Structures are given as structure tokens and as C-alpha cells.
Image (spheres, rainbow, N blue to C red):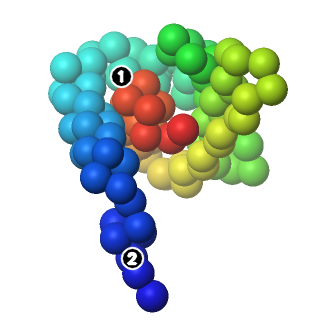
Amino acid sequence: MKSDEELLTPEQKQRELDVISECFRLMQSERSRYEKQAIAFIDSGHFSTETNSYSIKFLIKNNQFACIATSKLPNADSHSTFAPIPESRDKQIEELIELFAQSEAGLIF
């Protein structure tokens, strides 16, 4: 059985590397903004943002952080991902910083 990496075209592999690199870049360069968003999200239980292609909602669902990305294009797919909620507030903020960066970089969809 082939691994997922073996099934990807060279262009898909490059896109994956680009998205992962962008995610790490955002986690560093946008950390302050993401931290403020995380605190607001923890206090309110929801947060929304947009990219060029998606409307993204963050909420707490089934005792997990949920990220739901809805395409702005008609008849396009929605994507979602979930992350466990850590016990400490500091770890919650770190988890959300990573989730925000992943969504903004396009790693989730």
C-alpha cells in the first residue's frame, strides 16, 4: 500500500510544503494577533474571520474547539476540523494560535 505522500503529484507535494511553511510563518509573525483572537474566543465562545475564499467560524462544539470553513463560492464544499480543549488557559491559547494559523494558511481546507 502506498503512503499518502507517494500518491501526491509533484505539484500537490509542493502545495503541501508551501501551506505548511505558511502556517509556521503565520504562527510566528501573527502570534500577537492570534493571541488576542484566542483570548476573545475563550471569553465569548465564538470567533469569525474571512479569507479571500472562505468564511471561517470558530466555536466550541461537543467540548472541542471547532473550525468551520464555508466557501464563498456557490455550491462549494464546507470543511471543518476539531481540536481537543486543553485544561489550562495557556494551553488553550496555544491550541487556538495553531488553529488560527492553520486556517489562515489553508491547511484545513
Residue type at mark 2? Ser
The local crowd at label 2, few if under 14, some if 14 to 19, many if 20 or more residues have their Cα within 10 Å, is: few
- Image coordinates of residue 24 in percent, x first then y, are 23, 36
Residue at image coords 26%, 26%: 26
Q: Which element type, helix, strand or loop, lies under badge 1? A: helix
- Image coordinates of residue 2 in percent, x first then y, are 41, 81
Question: Could you tell me if residue 93 is visible in this image?
Answer: no
Foreground pick, 96 / 19 = 19
- Image coordinates of residue 60 in percent, x first then y, are 68, 38
Q: Are marks 2 and 1 in contact (CB under 8 Å)?
A: no
- Image coordinates of residue 52 in percent, x first then y, are 51, 11
Q: Which residue is mark 1?
A: 35
- Residue 93 drawn above or below residue 51: below
Foreground pick, 67 / 79 = 79
- Residue 69 drawn above or below residue 63: above
Numbered disc in front, either 2 or 1: 2
User: For this view, does 27 lie left or right of residue 72?
Assistant: left
Q: The N terminus is located in which quarter? A: bottom left
User: For this view, does 12 lie left or right of residue 66?
Assistant: left
Q: Earlier in the sequence, mark 2 or mark 1?
A: 2
Question: Could you tell me if residue 8 is visible in this image?
Answer: yes
Residue at image coords 75%, 50%: 62
Instruction: Report how far apart the C-alphas of labels 2 and 1 lie in the structure.
Output: 35 Å
Q: Which residue is mark 2?
A: 3
The local crowd at label 1, few if under 14, some if 14 to 19, many if 20 or more residues have their Cα within 10 Å, is: some
Residue type at mark 1? Glu
Residue at image coords 26%, 31%: 22
